Amino acid sequence: MLCRKDYRTLKNRNLLWAFTFSFLIMFWELKMADGPRIKREKKTVDTMIRLYCHKHHGTRGELCPECSEFHEYAMLRLSKCPFQENKSTCGKCLVHCYKPDMKTKITKVMRYSGPRMLLHHPILALHHVFDGRKKPEPLKK
């Protein structure tokens, strides 16, 4: 049977554990929060995938299941990019985050959508061009 002192100690440990756990979650969310550069890159990739899916799979508004899965994968890769706000475009990056089959898919999507971005979303296309001129930084250890 627990005495009063043991109960208080146990209660304090539980509170401390709960506080530590909530702090870790809050820290993780802050670390995973996207900055303006990543948000813009996500918007650009999203637009490129939608243009590609609309033309090749005949969708309007919604993505087909294949492109939807690819979209989620691309957004996850951008969120976990080690360079974050200092990144160049993925084509010039020193670290290749995509799996080989997904890399061929994103290359195919960007080759189709890139030139058409100038007509559909010229500001995003120009930002992408300017970001591509930035030299990739070496990865810090």
Image (tube, helix red, strand yellow):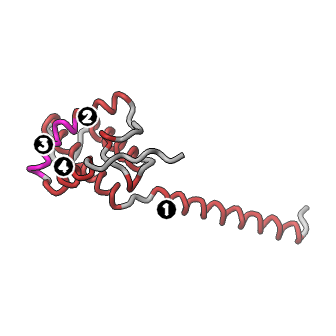
Quadrant including the N terminus: bottom right
Mark 1: few, some, or many residues within 10 Å (few <14, many ≥20)? few
What residue appears at the point 13 percent right and 38 percent down from the top-left corner? 55
Provide the secondary structure element on which disc 1 rests. Answer: helix
Q: Contact, CB < 8 Å: mark 2 with mark 4?
A: no
Name the foreground residue: 62 vs 112: 112
> Where residue 95 sits: x, y (%)?
41, 39
How crowded pointer 2 is (Cα within 10 Å; few <14, some 14-19, many 20+) is rated as: few
Please name the residue that numbered disc 2 is placed on.
Answer: 107
Q: Nearer the viewer, mark 2 or mark 4?
A: 2
Classify mark 2: helix, strand or loop.
helix
Q: Earlier in the sequence, mark 2 or mark 4?
A: 4
* Three-letter code for the amino acid on which mark 1 is drawn: Leu
* Labels 1, 4: front one: 1
Secondary-structure class at tag 4: loop
Query: 10 Å neighbourhood of mark 3: few (<14), some, or many (≥20)?
Result: few
> Which residue corresponds to mark 3?
115
Label 1 vs 4, first from the N-terminus? 1
Which label number is shown at residue 30?
Answer: 1
Label 4 amino acid?
Gly
Few, some or many residues within 10 Å of mark 4 (<14, 14–19, 20+): few
Q: Nearer the viewer, residue 14 or 75?
A: 75
Magenta stretch: give its range: 109-120
| Mark 3 and mark 4: Cα distance apart in space | 20 Å
Q: Which residue is mark 4?
A: 61
The three-letter code of the residue at mark 2 reads: Thr
Which secondary structure class fits the magenta region best? helix
Marks 3 and 4 in Cβ contact (< 8 Å)? no
